[in-house]
Image (cartoon, rainbow, N blue to C red):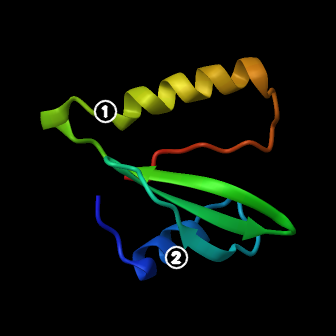
Amino acid sequence: MSLTMSDLTELITGLPCFKAPSNITPLGGGITNTNVTVEDEDCKYVVRIGSDIAEHGVMRWNELALVKQRISWVFPLKSFIIRQVF
């Protein structure tokens, strides 16, 4: 997945979980996804962005369902937001 910094900034600033995201910085790695750090209200977060790659068996909807289920066991927080963006 190849996104420009402009694309990343637009995507991340549009997420409702952030109030004023800043210092969006790409992280290394991420063969099938793009990982960045984001600062918002004195906290630092890692955002993982990816899309389906059917020919490699990478289905983000499946990952999303698994992560949501796992988080509901570990972090029963109302403010935690995960959504598929592509």
Task: Give coordinates of residue 56: x percent, y percent.
Answer: 18, 34
Q: Residues within 10 Å of mark 1 (few under 14, many from 20)?
A: some
Q: Residues within 10 Å of mark 2 (few under 14, many from 20)?
A: some
Query: Relative to residue 26, is residue 10 depicted above or below?
Result: below
Extreme right residue here? Answer: 42
Seen at 51% across and 22% down, the residue is 66
Front residue (pair 55, 62) = 55
Seen at 46% across and 71% down, the residue is 8
Extreme top residue here? Answer: 73
Compared across the picture, whether 79 is left or right of 62 comes to: right
Quadrant the N terminus occupies: bottom left
User: Which residue in the structure is indicated by mark 2?
Assistant: 9
Picture quarter containing residue 69?
top right
Compared across the picture, whether 60 is left or right of 81 comes to: left
Task: Give coordinates of residue 58: x percent, y percent.
Answer: 28, 33
Hey, what amino acid is under mark 2? Thr
Compared across the picture, whether 9 is left or right of 53 comes to: right
Task: Give coordinates of residue 2: x percent, y percent.
Answer: 29, 65
Picture quarter containing residue 75?
top right
SS class of the residue under badge 1?
Answer: loop
Seen at 87% across and 68% down, the residue is 42
Compared across the picture, whether 48 is left or right of 62 comes to: right
Label disc, if present, on residue 59 of the rendered structure: 1
Real-space Cα distance between discs 1 and 2? 24 Å
Hey, what amino acid is under mark 1? Met
For marks 1 and 2 on the same chain, the one whose residue lies earlier in the sequence: 2
Query: Relative to residue 4, is residue 51 depicted above or below?
Result: above
Query: Relative to residue 17, is residue 54 depicted above or below?
Result: above
